[in-house]
Amino acid sequence: MKENHKPLVSIIMPMYNSEAYIRDAIKSVIAQTYKNWELLVVDDGSTDGSRGIVEKFMVWDSRIHLLQNPCPIGMPSEPRNYGIQAAHGRYIAFLDSDDMWLPSKLAQQLPIFQDNRTAVVYSDYEKIDESGKRSARVVMAPPQVDYQKMLYSNYIGNLTGIFDVQKVGKNYFQQIRHEDYAFWLSVLKSGYIARSTQTITALYRVRSSSLSANKLRLLSWQWNILRNVEQISIPRAIKYYVTYAYNALIKNMI
């Protein structure tokens, strides 16, 4: 199949003062062996040189677009939602401006959608330090998850997740903390499943300033999702919460 006849993938990349890392993030998209994509970089009010970097990439690659989030609130949910609204692709994927994909990420994931039950595809990912150094710190995900299994843990690393708009429509992020976990729950709640490539397709940059660095706060956000977003009873929420906390501890140790 010719490349321009393959389904379009829309890649949403929120950006806020990302000049130190965004070149690597964009280059990792350009390096994809699957070529029919659009990259929507959504600026959330940057005051550094981030916009200029993106504009230079746009000069020689028309697949890259720079959008301006009109209502910055300091949370990644809004620029992601703005990008989703503007996306034209059948598939929508996410990549933060300080992370990277490996070249075959999309090529490995898209064939898995041929299963009619699969609305989401994800992968394992490798942690890297702030300088980008790799040291085989791999976060492995189960081969398959559904809504019920996801209540026990956030198995879908957001930088690896991609969903089929044709199957589930355009879903949007809520303005809450741990919004990525709530997002994938909402997508899978319709009854579809998520499947993994069971390969490493992305590199997650561990930064001391990242929101997820404070694991105690993350656990409080998790409780809020279980009780107030998913409206799960206290006994069931405790069961999910304890398992989630254990899995989060193991993931943090990697």
Image: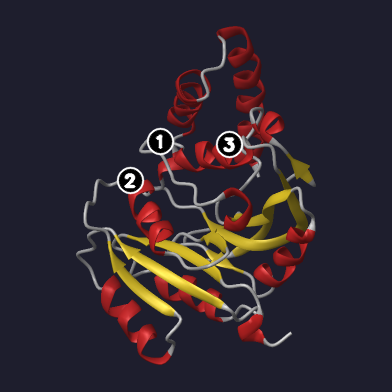
Residue under the point 46% across and 81% down: 63
- Sequence-wise first label, 2 or 3: 2
Q: Nearer the viewer, residue 95 or 2?
A: 2
Q: Earlier in the sequence, mark 1 or mark 3?
A: 1
Circle 1 residues within 10 Å: few <14, some 14–19, many ≥20: many
Q: Which mark is residue 75?
A: 2
In the picture shown, does residue 248 fall above or below 131?
A: above
x and y, in percent, of residue 97 in the image: 42, 63
**Tag count:** 3
In the image: residue 108, left or right of residue 93: right
CA separation in Å, label 2 and label 3: 19 Å
Between marks 1 and 3, how big is the CA–CA gap? 14 Å
Left or right of 175, for residue 133: right
The circle on residue 185 is 3
Q: Which residue is mark 1?
A: 177
Q: Indicate the position of residue 225 as horizontal and vertical percent values.
A: 49, 26
Verify CB contact (< 8 Å) between mark 2 and mark 3: no
Q: Quadrant of residue 228?
A: top left
Q: Secondary structure at mark 3?
A: helix
Quadrant location of the C terminus in the rendered image: top right
Q: Residue at x 37, y 75 (%)?
A: 65
Position of the N terminus, as image quadrant, is: bottom right
- Whole-Å distance between the Cαs marked 2 and 1? 8 Å
Q: How is the image coloured?
A: secondary structure
Residue 43, quarter of the rendered image: bottom left
Q: Secondary structure at mark 1?
A: loop
Is residue 43 shown above or below 140? Answer: below
Residue located at (51% from left, 67% from top): 10
Amino acid type at image mark 1: Arg
Given contact means CB atoms under 8 Å apart, are the residues at marks 2 and 1 in contact? yes
